[in-house]
Image (cartoon, rainbow, N blue to C red):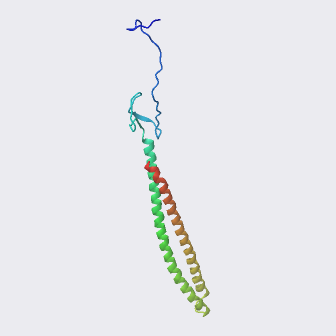
């Protein structure tokens, strides 16, 4: 068959495949239901262009839960700090009472030897002294506990804050 120039005498149909110059896969950082689509297939787009809007309810809820957790942690920190201050004050008060109880008990040792006080009075001063010593140990334990609670709340807050910034 010889080639000729000019219009075709009969239509020539042939199936062909068209391939794009480049293919780009698009994905988002988060998954969710698309509620608005801003482009259609075949549209040209540029870097940073908003292509779609994802239903934000799930993510807003997650941020609100995270914020509530952070607020609870801050509250726990404040409570622990108040407990620490209270425990320190209590310890100081117990130390003052203990000092007074030691003086009284030391005096009662001599008074008991001299027969001036009864065994019951002597036993009472000894029991008071032992009770205050136990209270002092409990106050020290309360201080350590409050310090650990503050420390734990501080770590939790540091853990939560980066999650809420995203």
> From the viewer's perspective, is 120 left or right of 156?
right
**Position above or below: 111 against 144:** below
Where residue 126 sits in the image (x, y, percent)?
A: 59, 82
Residue 125 drawn at (x, y percent): 57, 83
Please identify the residue farthest to the bottom as the structure is shown. Answer: 114
Q: Position of residue 100 (x, y in %)?
A: 52, 83
- Expressed as whole percent of the image width and height from the top left, the position of residue 18 reads 46, 22
Q: Residue at x 49, y 72 (%)?
A: 88
- Front in this rendered view, residue 162 or 107: 162
Along the line of sight, the residue nearer the viewer: 48 or 33: 48
Above or below, 26 relative to 150: above
Q: Nearer the viewer, residue 101 or 163?
A: 163
- The residue at the point 44 percent across, 45 percent down is 61
Image mark count:
0
Figure check: 105 above or below 114: above
Q: Nearer the viewer, residue 155 or 131?
A: 155
Determine the residue positioned at 49% across, 54% down.
159
Vertical order, 16 against 50 (above or below) = above
């Amino acid at each position: 068959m010889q080639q000729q120039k000019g219009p075709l005498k009969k239509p020539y149909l042939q199936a062909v495949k068209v391939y794009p110059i480049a293919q780009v896969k698009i994905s988002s950082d988060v998954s969710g239901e698309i509620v608005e689509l801003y482009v259609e297939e075949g549209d040209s787009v540029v870097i940073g262009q908003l292509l779609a809007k994802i239903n934000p309810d799930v993510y807003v809820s997650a941020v609100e839960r995270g914020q509530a957790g952070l607020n609870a942690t801050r509250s726990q920190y404040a409570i622990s700090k108040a407990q620490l201050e209270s425990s320190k004050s209590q310890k100081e008060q117990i130390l003052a009472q203990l000092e007074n109880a030691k003086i009284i008990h030391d005096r009662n040792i001599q008074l008991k030897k001299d027969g001036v006080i009864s065994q019951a009075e002597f036993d009472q001063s000894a029991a008071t002294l032992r009770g205050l010593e136990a209270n002092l140990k409990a106050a020290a334990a309360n201080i350590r506990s409050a310090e650990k609670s503050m420390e734990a709340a501080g770590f939790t807050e540091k853990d939560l804050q980066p999650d809420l910034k995203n």
